[in-house]
Image (cartoon, coloured by chain):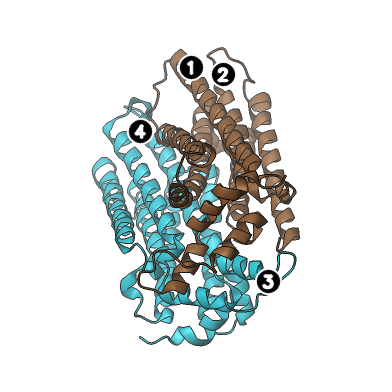
Chain colours: A cyan, B brown
Amino acid sequence: MEKRPQFLLALSAAAAAGVVAVAFVLRWVLHFREGLAWDGGPAEFNWHPVLIVIGFVVLQGIAIIVYRLPWTWQRSKLLMKFIHAGLNLLAFILAVISMVAVFDFHNFAKIPNMYSLHSWLGLAVVVLYGVQLVLGVGVYLVPVAPASWRAAFMPLHVYSGLLLFTSVIAVALMGITEKLIFGLSNPKYKDSPPEAVFVNVLGVLLVVFGGLILWIATRTSWKRPSDQVLHALHTNEGGEDNTKVGPALSQLSAGNDAESSADVRRRSNTLDDEAD
Amino acid sequence: MEKRPQFLLALSAAAAAGVVAVAFVLRWVLHFREGLAWDGGPAEFNWHPVLIVIGFVVLQGIAIIVYRLPWTWQRSKLLMKFIHAGLNLLAFILAVISMVAVFDFHNFAKIPNMYSLHSWLGLAVVVLYGVQLVLGVGVYLVPVAPASWRAAFMPLHVYSGLLLFTSVIAVALMGITEKLIFGLSNPKYKDSPPEAVFVNVLGVLLVVFGGLILWIATRTSWKRPSDQVLHALHTNEGGEDNTKVGPALSQLSAGNDAESSADVRRRSNTLDDEAD
């Protein structure tokens, strides 16, 4: 791996931001708020931020960069795919439970559901995340999709994954804003009591964590070597879609995409059972 | 360009989302709110969402994808750099004016400044956007930076640019949430009056616009052909940083990055004065 110390630095920083964010959300609900319970009251609501931060932010972040961890590169790609899918499935389940907690709390307190932009975007993200999960498993884990489908879908899979992760953090920041406005009454949010400052810092931690995960995920030189080798091989092939810019260019632009068709074809044929 | 109809479709959709978002924010402040003025009152505050949506979201989005527009590919790269920098400078100025409007309004109404997560992240984004602008001009427009600096800085410039754009949208969504909670009293936000639904839709439009700009910006096959040719040339060169994965791999991973050192070196030497 190129620049391995830089990778470990970025990974350590992301891990630190993730762990501190989880500690912050737990301290928020346990120290500043009503704790955790499943009773229809505010303590049930509190599962919402806790499960979102642990599952939908931190576990999803780990799932995104799991292929980048050098100590997994001797493991089979198929195993890593299962870990990637498993972490995303767990994150999805926690997100659904966290939503149930909010609906329960709202219904118990006779607060309307689904009126806010936070709820609109949050529900959309959970639904689209479920779609991404089903499509990801269907295309890359169940061995039925033709190689051409796997290839065609990969740029969209990568883009959607990163956009959904980013959107989760954006929706979490909106949720923090709502909760601090509604939850703080005397003193109010605008009076900056300790809870307000503390939870603002939680929001900053989520942004830092997200920024680091996106940095790690988008450094192509930090990719799993087998994926990089496939990229290298690919550029010695005849390109497809040689329309206007000539063969050499077409090869390159394809090679520059998140995953080219030849990559996926080869991987689906040979690398799922890569030596462990 | 590969898949030009798809590019035009994505561009048209982004343009439509941007135009409709601007129309929505204008209708919000002119029809549902107090209009626009510079009097320290709510109508001065209203410049904040208007200038953020027009400048910090839409103009910044255009600035990001300006190199992708096929009808600019016969223009010199230097001209396009000036347009890119100029649009970003304009977006920055509008963002600063929009912040002044909020501080004025807060001071006039004796509301504290800088207490909310929205204000913390918003100020951070504006400051970092200013830093990005200064560094971008200093490194890529003023002809003093060594080619090695230009090369080393490009992945960071691209990453920071996209992260700041994304953050602006996230902060805007938090701002919409705040304003709908504070601005709607009878009926309240939770009662879903027409203004609430209308402005929620504005938030969705901002997300759609952002998602489309990020899609366009991250399709390498939609890059300006001169940049793609440089990528193609680069893979026939000896690679740098040939550490563990062999020369071919190193070339590829460098070629896969947003901009490789050889690209930038060549561009800075020859392409700034590309035939117009």
Q: Are marks 1 and 2 on the same chain?
A: yes
Q: Residue at x 52, y 63 (%)?
A: B255
Mark 2 lies on residue: B44
Residue A127 x, y percent position in the rendering: 55, 60
Marks 4/2: CA distance?
27 Å
Q: Nearer the viewer, mark 1 or mark 3?
A: 3
Q: Residue at x 29, y 30 (%)?
A: A193
Marks 2/3: CA distance?
56 Å
Q: Amino acid at mark 2?
A: Glu
Residue B182 in view, yes or no: yes
Mark 3 lies on residue: A247
Q: Quadrant of the C terminus of chain B?
A: top right
Q: Amino acid at mark 1?
A: Asp
Chain at numbered mark 4 = A
Q: Quadrant of the N terminus of chain B?
A: bottom right
Marks 1/3: CA distance?
58 Å
Mark 4 lies on residue: A184
Q: Secondary structure at mark 3?
A: helix
Q: Is residue A274 above or below residue A225?
A: below
Q: Is residue A262 left or right of residue A89?
A: right
Q: Secondary structure at mark 4?
A: loop
Mark 1 lies on residue: B104
Chain at numbered mark 3 = A
Marks 4/3: CA distance?
62 Å
Q: Residue at x 47, y 73 (%)?
A: B248
Q: Are marks 1 and 4 on the same chain?
A: no
